[in-house]
Image: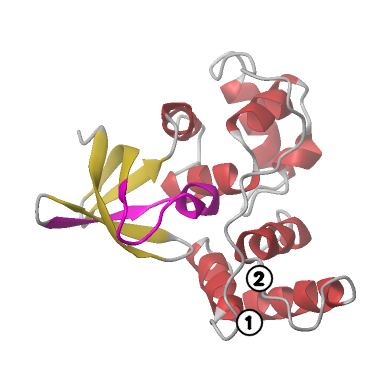
Amino acid sequence: MIASLTGTVTHVTLERAVLDVGGVGYLVHATPGTLAGLRVGERAQLHTTLVVREDSMTVFGFAEADEREVFETAQSVSGVGPRIALAMLAVLTPDALRRAVASEDLAALRRIPGVGPKSAQRMVLELSGKLGAPTSAAAGAVVPDAPPVAAGDPARDQVVEALVGLGWAAKVAQDTVDRVLADAGDDRPADSPIDVAATLRAALRSLGGRRG
């Protein structure tokens, strides 16, 4: 079990990062909120968990140990694997997830990609009492923003890639991102860069539990 990694960040995208630890580059999958705190060339420590499958070994990393624990606990729900568990933390903070489960807020849970009415009910039933009480009084489901993407960077493609990685069809992902960006265009100055994490969250809210 790889419980943590400390090393130099050599690469960061919307979905993953590479951490150089003693000359070995570890590919780590994480949420946009965790990745927002990483800077290429700087040292970082991530709380990690290793998911082993017959054909792969995948490392998932988190800024806080609490996120890792929620990620692991979420996978105790029938039908919830690493992909959906990570999507849960991309949409909801650990405390927001605890509140959603405790209050049986199915609408909040259905904002997670791949989660429909039955899945949301199953989460409430099977996670009840397992996540503990919220650790703060903060409300809402907002995760930390990533820094705005510099003008000219393929920010739209990053968001589309993230949605496809979470299981959405490419056409659905592209159309949703374009629609979200068009809706946000009225409020964003013409020359301002796209906020990748905010755009991803808006796309996830738009998609809800629907599949394409």
Would residue 71 be found to the left or right of residue 134 on screen?
left
Circle 2 is placed at which residue position? 212
Instruction: Look at the image and name its color scheme.
Output: secondary structure
Residue sitting at x 85%, y 73%: 183
Task: Name the residue rendered at 58%, 23% in the picture.
Answer: 127
Q: Is residue 182 visible?
A: yes
Instruction: Please report the residue visible at 74 percent of the width from the left and 60 percent of the height from the top.
Output: 202
Q: Is residue 92 above or below residue 197?
A: above
* Residue 84 x, y percent position in the rendering: 52, 48
Does the residue at mark 1 contact the one at mark 2 (Cβ under 8 Å)? yes
Q: Residue furthest right?
A: 186
Asked if residue 78 is positioned above or below residue 132 in the image, the reply reads: below
User: Helix, strand or loop at disc 2?
Assistant: loop
Quadrant in which residue 172 is drawn: bottom right
Q: Which residue is mark 1?
A: 171
Residue 206 placed where, x, y %?
Answer: 77, 62
Q: Nearer the viewer, residue 43 or 55?
A: 43
Is 197 placed left or right of 166 in the picture? right
Residue range of the region highlighted in magenta in the rendering: 24-43
* Residue at screen point 29% across, 43% down: 51
| Front position in the image: 89 or 79 | 89
- Against 125, is 71 above or below? below
